[in-house]
Image (cartoon, rainbow, N blue to C red):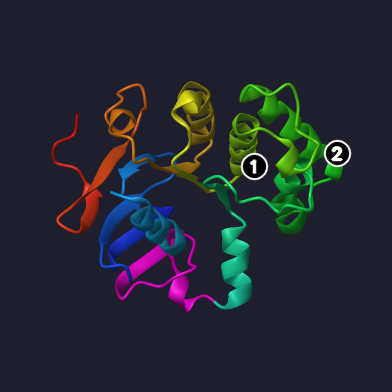
Amino acid sequence: MADPPVIEFDGAALENGITVDLALHAGELALIDPGDESHERAVVDAACGLTVPVRGAVRMLGRDWRRLPPDLANALRGRIGHGFRPGAWISYLSVLDNIMLAQLHHTTRPDADIRNEAVRLSMAFGLPGVPTGLPADCGPGDLARAGLVRAFMGSPALVILESPPGDLTGALVNRIRTVRDRGTSVVWLTLAPELWHDQAIPASQRCRLHGGVIAAAKDRP
């Protein structure tokens, strides 16, 4: 029997009025233009099981978010790497602690192992090392890079990227190629038409909002 999709929107009508049809299997990349930030937020929240569809279903690894007890839902969210929009930092923790937090909570990895991975990923995204100060002490460029480090930590089954900066596309594509080889799926949301059409981004699917539905585009570039 074939493995279920890593993330599946099965005719999922979301509370904001849009419907999403998408099935993303292991190692695939979906590049999605959701139309605006509110639609992007709705897609992300539904993918993480934080909201439930009005109709249809959203499943991760074959499990319907609506049918999972809270402890199992939280464990499943631990398998999602998340590149948030700017500002999603715990202000009183250092950037390093923010980056390490999910791995410390969801895994039994040694602290040193987690820290070393954070250093390696920081360098891959153009940082000299992991920022150790508070988020307020870091510039927006460094925080954007640190946010991608946080998203790719560990061995996520799914990585969700909320409109990452265009100037990081090269490093991001390189990292996505690496994790896709390990079976990680990636949902990359962007509101930039030039990125959505960029053939250097090796998307398995290109989806966009049309007629109130986000689905694979028929006019693929």
Q: Nearer the viewer, residue 198 or 112?
A: 198
Q: Earlier in the sequence, mark 1 or mark 2?
A: 2
Q: Amino acid at mark 1?
A: Arg
Instruction: State the quadrant of the C terminus.
Output: top left
Give the residue at mark 2.
112
Residue labelled with disc 1? 150
- Looking at the picture, does residue 99 appear above or below residue 79? above
SS of the residue under disc 2: helix
Q: Position of residue 204 (x, y in %)?
A: 32, 36
Is residue 1 among what the camera can see?
no
77 left or right of 62? right
Instruction: Please tell me which residue is depicted at 19% across the width and 59% down the height of the picture.
Output: 212
Residue 53 falls in which quadrant of the image? bottom left
**Residue 38 marker:** none
- Left or right: where 123 falls relative to 133: left
Q: Specify the segment rendered in magenta.
A: 47-68
Few, some or many residues within 10 Å of mark 2 (<14, 14–19, 20+):
few
Q: Residue 111: where, in percent of width, then height?
A: 84, 44
